[in-house]
Amino acid sequence: MNAQQNPAQFRLGKPLVVAIDGPSGSGKSSISREVARRLRANYLDTGAMYRAVTIACMRAGIDLTDAVAVEAATRNADIELSTSPDAEWVLVGGEDVTQAIREPEVSSNVSAVATTLGARAELVRRQQQLIKDSGLRIVAEGRDITTVVAPTAEVRILLTASEEARLRRRGVQLGGSQSAAALREQVLTRDVKDSTVVNFQQAADGVVTVDSSDLDFEETVQAVLDVVFASTH
Ligand SMILES: Nc1ncnc2c1ncn2[C@@H]1O[C@H](COP(=O)(O)OP(=O)(O)OP(=O)(O)O)[C@@H](O)[C@H]1O
Ligand SMILES: Nc1ccn([C@H]2C[C@H](O)[C@@H](COP(=O)(O)O)O2)c(=O)n1
């Protein structure tokens, strides 16, 4: 029996931490959110936290190349975010920044925060607390969840896709409004920068790779659920 035949056996009501990492545009957020729904689990978008700190720094006029200032701003950042897969909201200082953190300017600047090690340490600490607060029933996704944030998760997955698939999907997601060069900057160049501090291109020991290049959305959800099933039985 696999997950498709009987999705109801996923240790319902019991702890289940599913850690998912992968490069930009591989489908981490959308696939993880749907997997969380089907597992009746919480959902944590850790990239949204890096984006929230970035917008807080930009609004405060903080020089993003100043690691000491970025680290201090991260420690002081008042961030709240939904951990329900059915409600997407992010607040910074009580203000709703759910849409603003997705703006291209934030995408261009977020790597400066993500590559500040002191900022990472603070956000990893908060993410681990959010996972505990979820009752350890959560799908958490990002770049270092399988290796740093939740290395002992019951299920650890690297979700990948070819560059071509990732660029195509992000282009469709943005409504065809971006040039090829802008898409490469937002997807591939950002990955190169982020890769300098975390490894999300190769699976660490014990991490299962799901390559979605030739899978559609539903097939990818099922492939992830199959790994969850196989890892917990
Ligand atoms: N297997 C798939 N087939 C087709 N489209 C997909 C698939 N997986 C994800 N998508 C679509 O690709 C787009 C990008 O996915 P998503 O935003 O989840 O990626 P991501 O890895 O979280 O990216 P980022 O790290 O840059 O935020 C979305 O529109 C999503 O619906
Ligand atoms: N665990 C994480 C999550 C995200 N990041 C960085 C890398 C990205 O450039 C940025 C935004 O993430 P996205 O919303 O695109 O998934 O945050 C990270 O370093 N570690």
Image: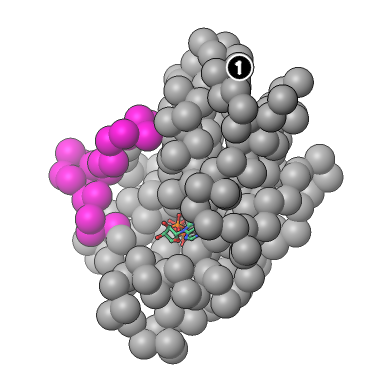
Amino acid tagged 1: Gln
Which residue is the site of mark 1?
9
What quarter of the picture does the N terminus occupy?
A: top right
Residue 87: x and y in percent read 28, 35
Q: Residue at x 29, y 72 (%)?
A: 175
Residue 133: x and y in percent read 45, 20
Label 1 residue SS: helix
What main secondary structure does the magenta stretch of the protein show?
loop
- Foreground pick, 226 / 118: 226
Confirm whether residue 204 shows in the render.
yes
Residue 16: x and y in percent read 60, 22
Q: Is residue 203 above or below residue 89?
A: below
| Neighbours of disc 1 within 10 Å: few (<14), some (14-19), many (20+) | few
Q: Is residue 123 above or below residue 53?
A: above
What quarter of the picture does the C terminus occupy?
A: top right
Q: Is residue 60 left or right of residue 65?
A: left
Confirm whether residue 68 shows in the render.
no
The colour mode here is: one colour
Please state the extent of the stretch shown in magenta in the rendering: 82-101
Q: Is residue 114 left or right of residue 226?
A: left
Is 86 colored magenta in this rendering?
yes
Q: Residue at x 69, y 37 (%)?
A: 227
- Foreground pick, 193 / 4: 4
The furthest residue to the left: 95
- Foreground pick, 82 / 9: 9
